Amino acid sequence: MDDVRFAVLGTGGIGRRTLEVSQYKDSLRAVAACDRNGVAVDHGGLDVPELLDATEGNIASGPQDGPGDDLATDGGAATAGVKQHGDEAGIVASEQGRPTETPIDDVIAESDAIDAVLVALPNLEHDFIPRVAERFAEAAYEGVLVDVLKRSRVIGMLDDREAKLKESGITFVCGAGATPGFLTGAAALAAQSFVDVEEVEIWWGVGLKSGYEDNRGTVREDIAHLDGYDIETAREMSDDEIEALIEEHDGVLEFHDMEHADDVLLERAGICDAEDVHVGGVLDVRSDEKPTTTTVSVTGTTFDGETGTNTFQLDDVTSMEANVNGPALGYLKAGVRNNRAGHYGVFGPADLMPGF
Amino acid sequence: MDDVRFAVLGTGGIGRRTLEVSQYKDSLRAVAACDRNGVAVDHGGLDVPELLDATEGNIASGPQDGPGDDLATDGGAATAGVKQHGDEAGIVASEQGRPTETPIDDVIAESDAIDAVLVALPNLEHDFIPRVAERFAEAAYEGVLVDVLKRSRVIGMLDDREAKLKESGITFVCGAGATPGFLTGAAALAAQSFVDVEEVEIWWGVGLKSGYEDNRGTVREDIAHLDGYDIETAREMSDDEIEALIEEHDGVLEFHDMEHADDVLLERAGICDAEDVHVGGVLDVRSDEKPTTTTVSVTGTTFDGETGTNTFQLDDVTSMEANVNGPALGYLKAGVRNNRAGHYGVFGPADLMPGF
């Protein structure tokens, strides 16, 4: 496969780390990046170390930056917008950057020479990223867009725009981070022993001590998944109420039957019915060690009538960041292969896996 | 994706089971099958149950059918040629079959309307399947060929013919069974947490009691992997010597550092160096239960400097047959996607996985 020239929208945690990780592969060339106030473009390849140095420490924190993506297992508020400390912070602080009031449009203007764009923006409103995709389509972009969100409803909003994306020649890979991305990909792989999949259980562990302050918005969103809470009640809680709740749980929150995009994505890939997918996990805000091992269990029946469970486990030492960025770039490259083959529209990670 | 019209060369265990498993997916349509003496073609779709009934019990056994593919974990001698019990056995016994002296050529003659061909023939000589591929290329076949072999040297022989395959428009997916197929695919997936993979360990368990008589050739080949043996010494052993060796090991043979294609395939997919791949396993010829759990362990370093091991495990109840046929069809479909995208040449299973 030829080189992949990619751009990153947003230089929060995921955007920055994607740039960082891409340096390990010669076949990936970062050519553009933007944040709220600046853009950097070099079609010959950005000087990634310089850009990372210049943008370091500009990551947003706190719920004031938006309603907080429910991204606990995907890097949390690290995807939130870059909080600029003065006009000269963020990308504009880089030698390669220049200030702009239209950073996304500036990248779109260069998109003829960009194969893939990782959209690592805070999804401030549910339809923000779908609307960004629409802007690329309106500019007749022919290439790949990738997000690492995990909200089922965003997928529906992308589907609503699928005709436009197809017409433009866009391959949109949604949810390509750790979960649903990495873990539904593993589920799709593990399902191949079976002719009928009965259940997929996705169980994650995240330790967030050092990232707690930066992820308060995320934690608030996660609380909405606890028994007796929903998005509205969680949003209305004061910070003190949230602290009290966390105290009550000794810093460890356990989630069951979360509404993740995993179910929708596995159903559309033909692996199993959405209702047979169960997602839960344990979040520890007082330790960086994972409180439980991230495990994907796929239970099914073989053609010869046996019922069994295949499993995929991530080592506890692999951070959620590591498990977001490798897969995101992997799916980005798989998206490019599909785009070059003329496969346009909206794809989940499991759609890009071999499967029968 | 549109329907995939596929053919099966060989109706031994793997060929038959692939036909059987394909019935679970509407998107797969079996249109041709052949064995040594017969061919069945129906572009509207074969009547698979009738064909399976007619060919049942015609599976070859014993080392006399060839030098025995070293396919213990892939279905063993089940891939060996169909042993015909009289002229009317095998495909010709089916209402859909007709006798032929040129079964492969007969399928090639129909290949304009065939998207993919599973080559489930006994690889009687190392270059037999590569030569079959060449015959398809000489007929200007544009489509997918899949094998489930696991010999590194066959891959080299395919590579030698890659220019011819590309010119014809053939996408050849090699080693697409349980191992290397399923397990190297899992390794490629698991590797995505890491920027550097230090080791891939593939460890399989196979229980072969009920299949032992049918897999004597395979067991002989496996013996070549034991310490102090090689292919030549194993071939020269008498049946009594083999029985004595098995007796000495109480029916359980343990293998380390096997020469499988896994290493070559993971290196070509860019996952790690071939020398960092270790393959071993335990074969129990006196029990159908797996003597050890098939496990893929991928050890690597994350971008943030942690070293860990991700693991993929198959349930002990999943038979090697189940773990061959689902992945084989999965890679066949992935091959078709690639073929339609104009990606021609020789591919390993891990090449078809998302990966950065």
Image: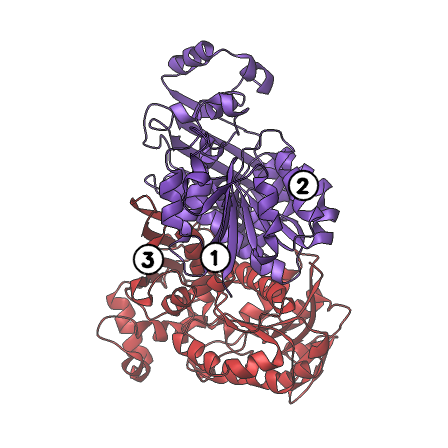
Chain colours: A red, B purple
Of badges 3 and 1, the one in the foreground is: 3
Amino acid carrying label 1: it is Ser
Chain at numbered mark 3: A
Say which residue label 1 marks: A319
| Alpha carbon distance from label 1 to label 2 | 40 Å
Say which residue label 2 marks: B158
Say which residue label 3 marks: A201
Chain at numbered mark 1: A
Amino acid carrying label 2: it is Leu
- Are dots 2 and 3 in contact, CB under 8 Å? no
| Co-location on one chain, circles 2 and 3 | no
For label 3, the crowd category at 10 Å Cα-Cα, with few meaning under 14, some 14 to 19 and many 20 or more, is many
| Co-location on one chain, circles 3 and 1 | yes
Residue appearing at x 70%, y 77% in the figure: A40
Q: Secondary structure at mark 1?
A: loop
Residue appearing at x 65%, y 33% in the figure: B127
Q: Is residue A37 visible?
A: no
| Co-location on one chain, circles 1 and 2 | no
Q: Position of residue B104 (x, y in %)?
A: 59, 42
Q: Judge by depth and name the residue closer to the eye, B275 or B116.
A: B116
Of badges 2 and 3, the one in the foreground is: 2
Q: Is residue A113 visible?
A: yes
The quarter of the picture where residue A12 lies is bottom right
- Are dots 3 and 1 in contact, CB under 8 Å? no
| Image vertical order of residue A107 relative to residue A290, above or below | below
Q: Position of residue B340 (x, y in %)?
A: 61, 62
Amino acid carrying label 3: it is Glu
| Alpha carbon distance from label 2 to label 3 | 40 Å
Q: Secondary structure at mark 3?
A: strand
Residue appearing at x 38%, y 43% in the figure: B52
Of badges 1 and 2, the one in the foreground is: 2
